[in-house]
Amino acid sequence: MRVRHGIAEWYGQSLLGLSPTERRRLATVALDEHPEIPSCPFQPNAPPCRKPGGVCSIIRYAPTETGRIARSEGDPVIVCPARFQQSSMLMRWFAEIVGFAAEEAMQAREVPFMHSTATGKPAGKIDVVLAREAKGTLRWYGLEIQAVYFSGKGMRSEFLAMKADSRSQPPYPNANRRPDWRSSSAKRLMPQLQVKVPTVRRWGSKLAVAVDRPFFDSIGGPGDSPRHDLDDGDVIWLVPKLVPNQAGGYSLQRGHWEVLTLEETNAKLLAAAPVQRSSFEGELSKRLQPLE
């Protein structure tokens, strides 16, 4: 049976837990037809959602014979960075790993890290910095949070389908979409780490990376003997997971963590090898078209 990725969490709520009326209302918000934007339940003080369309995570769905969602399969994939902020679990976990007592740990978001040599203005930031000040000494660690991009048709057609639908079970996703692991890892995350890690290392600290379990599994998953000594590498990998909760939604929980060198991290993020020439040229032949 074919499966397609569709909305798992929408404006902080599980899609399968929404009524048809609630789905239609959220669809009007996602289509910019409603002035009241729902708050984000995962961020401190629950500010209005800032992600266009409001999709927090996506998941694979199997269809019924009548074109409705039959069931979900596998884990949700986080597509919004704010989803990692639920209950401050990630930062408390991070503080514990680096040896900061919860009552002493502090954080700062979007701290400027680079500046333009032409204008002097900030040109790059660290997503979050975890720090502790004690006895006149400042210790800190950076954290980069990487959600996943998806490829395929945009979500607008999905929102339109939800807006027009009144049946109890949500409609099956109407287009093929999939997590774009390559763009999220080798094209997005790896260049940032290559720039930031050497400088942070030179300053005597380390950088952490937070990705969800499906992302981490896509680049090879845990090592055979995960290292938990901070002196054994340059990058602290934090891999939380979304698990079903009693309310019918998902909760962010601690998962796997390990320490890797920058070189090991780069190799993990590449997670790809060239195809054989015959395979490449065979696929090329199928795609060739006359110039327009």
Image (spheres, grey):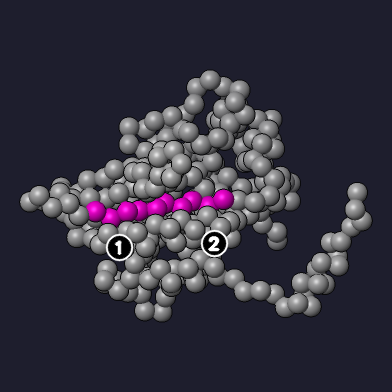
- Mark 1 lies on a secondary structure that is helix
Label at residue 124 = none
Is 220 left, or right, of 231 in this rendering?
right
Is 239 left, or right, of 59 in this rendering?
left
- Residue 91 in percent (x, y) is at 29, 51
Q: Of helix, strand and loop, which mostly describes the magenta segment?
A: strand
- Residue 185 in percent (x, y) is at 52, 60
Q: Which of the marked residues, 1 or 2, is nearer the chain's N terminus? A: 2
Residue positioned most to the front? 118
Occupied quadrant, residue 282: bottom right
Label at residue 186 = 2
Asked if the stretch drawn in magenta spans residue 13, the answer is no
Query: In front: 220, or 1?
Result: 220
Q: Amino acid at mark 1?
A: Arg
Q: Amino acid at mark 2?
A: Ala
Query: In front: 128, or 179?
Result: 128
| Viewport quadrant of the N terminus | bottom right
- Given contact means CB atoms under 8 Å apart, are the residues at marks 1 and 2 in contact? no
Q: Which is closer to the viewer, label 1 or label 2?
A: 1
Is 285 left, or right, of 34 in this rendering?
right
Residue span colored magenta: 140-149
- Residue 27 in percent (x, y) is at 60, 31
Query: In front: 69, or 54?
Result: 54
Residue positioned most to the left? 135
Q: Eyeballing the image, is 261 above or below 60?
A: below
* Residue under the point 30% across and 62% down: 202
* Residue under the point 37% across and 61% down: 197
Pointer 1 residue: 202
Residue 60 appearing in the image: no
- Residue 168 in percent (x, y) is at 61, 37
